Image (cartoon, rainbow, N blue to C red):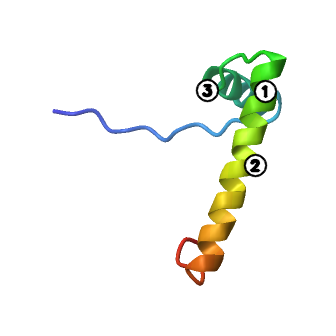
């Protein structure tokens, strides 16, 4: 017979800050300054392309 599932505890305060920091660091690779610049340019281009698609499709991509 399966054991009952317990409620997930709610974290607060410093634990939340530490959790978010660790999560961010684990998801984002360490980039060099030149790679950061390239990534920011790529993100800006992607955002501009998305805005063009939204305008061209009357908001379908929104």
Vertical arrangement, residue 6 with respect to residue 48, above or below: above
Q: Position of residue 35 (x, y in %)?
A: 75, 22
Q: CA distance from mark 1 to mark 3?
A: 15 Å
- Helix, strand, or loop for circle 3? helix
Q: Earlier in the sequence, mark 2 or mark 3?
A: 3
Is residue 50 left or right of 16 when viewed as pictured?
Answer: left
Q: Residue at x 63, y 62 (%)?
A: 50
Q: Is residue 31 above or below residue 46?
A: above
> Residue placed at 65% from the left, 59% from the top?
49
Q: Is residue 45 above or below residue 24?
A: below
Task: Tell which of 26 and 47 is nearer to you.
Answer: 47
Decide: few, some or many residues near mark 2? Use Cα within 10 Å; few <14, some 14-19, many ≥20: few
Q: Mark 1 vs mark 2: which is more N-terminal?
A: 1
Mark nearest the camera among 1 and 3 is 1
* Relative side of 60 to 52, left or right: left
Residue 26's disc is: none
Dot placed on the residue nearer the N-terminal end, 1 or 3: 3
**Disc 3 packing (10 Å; few <14; some 14–19; many ≥20):** few
Residues packed near mark 1 inside 10 Å, few (<14), some (14 to 19) or many (20 plus) = few
Q: Tags 1 and 3 in contact by the CB under 8 Å rule?
A: no
Mark 1: which secondary structure?
helix
Element assignment for label 2: helix
Residue 56 lies in quadrant: bottom right
State left or right for residue 53 relative to residue 36.
left
Q: CA distance from mark 1 to mark 2?
A: 12 Å
Disc 2 marks which residue?
44
Taking depth in this image into account, of 22 and 30 the one nearest to the observer is 30
Q: Which residue is mark 3?
A: 27
**Residue at image mark 1:** 36
Residue 13 x, y percent position in the rendering: 82, 34
Proximity of marks 1 and 2: CB atoms separated by less than 8 Å: no
């Amino acid at each position: 017979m399966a054991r009952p599932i317990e409620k997930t505890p709610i974290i607060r305060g410093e634990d939340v800050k530490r959790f978010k920091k660790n999560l961010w660091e684990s998801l984002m690779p360490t980039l060099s300054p030149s790679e950061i610049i390239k990534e920011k340019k790529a993100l800006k281009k992607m955002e501009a392309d998305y805005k063009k698609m939204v305008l061209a499709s009357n908001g379908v991509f929104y």
